[in-house]
Image (spheres, rainbow, N blue to C red):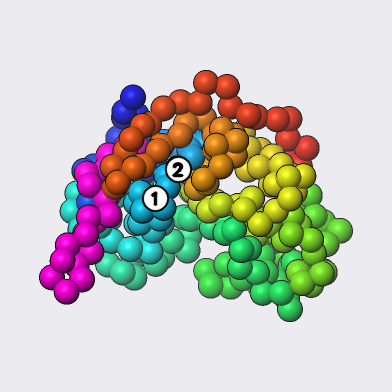
């Protein structure tokens, strides 16, 4: 089932998106006419095997790459008309990233890691403290706020990474294999937090190869050979009662 919705309500509206790579005159099509919409507050999983175009799609959606053809509207704006500077600004202000490898600066404390996006956004020093504390409180790690992240467990590191993704109040959170380096208990905690963010109105895009993890979302887009193989709602999302967000 193709999921289409009112474009005016869409955070992401992708129409016939294509991406070609050229190497020594040989063209490789990574995306072959992908179309879908994601609305504010949606929780969507993107799945696909290696070579399916999943990574290329996510790079384009998060403004780390540009498509070869088709249209990508973000909050109603045609992104092909925006400069690289414009896209960098949108990426910093409107998108929060959570990575499989955490991407924390381990010699810095939890507070200092979460503060980094605010520094790049030129948020005044006086305003940062409450924003950082609120983000860390949202993931239930107030007691680790001044601990170097090198001393945290894997699950705690990922939760701090989520706090960092939240601190700028982004329109979308991209979670790229967020449980890939975690044990099952820590992975469940991280998914519980992402679910809670969704329950509180956040738009979450989850990239995963694990079906059980993907089913925390309300909808799964599966890619194969650069095209959408299926775009279907999850019949019974694996939602649990969130214990972190109050």
Question: Between 71 and 206, which is closer to the camera in this rendering?
Answer: 206
State the quadrant of the N terminus: top left
Q: Residue shown at 67%/65% (left/top)?
A: 114
Residue hosting label 2:
47
- Horizontal arrangement in the rendering, residue 166 relative to residue 66 (left or right): right
Res 140 visible: yes
Q: Residue shown at 74%/59% (left/top)?
A: 154
User: Residue 122 occupies which quadrant of the picture?
Assistant: bottom right
Please tell me whether residue 33 belongs to the stretch shown in magenta.
yes
In the structure shown, which secondary structural element does the residue marked by tag 1 occupy?
A: helix
Dots 2, 1 in contact, CB < 8 A: yes
Q: Position of residue 131 (x, y in %)?
A: 67, 58
- Horizontal arrangement in the rendering, residue 123 relative to residue 46 (left or right): right
- Horizontal arrangement in the rendering, residue 227 relative to residue 47 (left or right): left
Instruction: Count how many numbered circles sit on residues in the image.
Output: 2
| Residue 89 position (above or below residue 135) | below
Q: Residue furthest bottom?
A: 107
Res 61 visible: no
Q: Position of residue 184 (x, y in %)?
A: 73, 45
Q: Residue shown at 28%/42% (left/top)?
A: 227
- Which stretch appears magenta? 19-37
Marking on residue 246: none
Marking on residue 54: 1
Q: Main secondary structure of the magenta part?
A: strand
Please tell me whether residue 57 belongs to the stretch shown in magenta.
no
């Amino acid at each position: 089932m193709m999921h289409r919705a009112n474009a005016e309500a869409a955070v992401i509206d992708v129409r016939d998106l294509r991406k070609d790579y050229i190497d020594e005159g040989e063209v490789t099509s990574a995306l072959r006419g992908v179309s879908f919409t994601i609305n504010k507050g949606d929780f969507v999983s993107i799945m696909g095997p290696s070579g399916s175009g999943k990574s290329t799609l996510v790079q384009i959606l998060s403004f780390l790459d540009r498509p070869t053809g088709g249209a990508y509207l973000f909050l109603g704006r045609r992104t092909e008309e925006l400069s690289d500077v414009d896209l960098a600004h949108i990426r910093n202000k409107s998108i929060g990233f959570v990575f499989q490898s955490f991407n924390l600066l381990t010699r810095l404390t939890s507070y200092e890691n979460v503060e980094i996006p605010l520094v790049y956004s030129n948020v005044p020093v006086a305003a940062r403290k409450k924003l950082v504390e609120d983000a860390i409180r949202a993931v239930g790690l107030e007691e680790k706020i001044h601990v170097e992240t090198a001393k945290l467990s894997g699950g705690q590191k990922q939760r701090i990474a989520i706090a960092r993704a939240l601190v700028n109040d982004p329109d979308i959170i991209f979670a790229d294999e967020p449980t890939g380096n975690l044990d099952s208990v820590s992975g469940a905690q991280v998914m519980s937090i992402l679910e809670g963010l969704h329950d509180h109105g956040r738009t979450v895009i989850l990239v995963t190869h694990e079906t059980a993890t993907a089913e925390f979302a309300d909808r799964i887009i599966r890619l194969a050979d650069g095209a959408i193989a299926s775009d279907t709602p999850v019949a019974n999302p694996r939602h649990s009662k969130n214990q972190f967000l109050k």
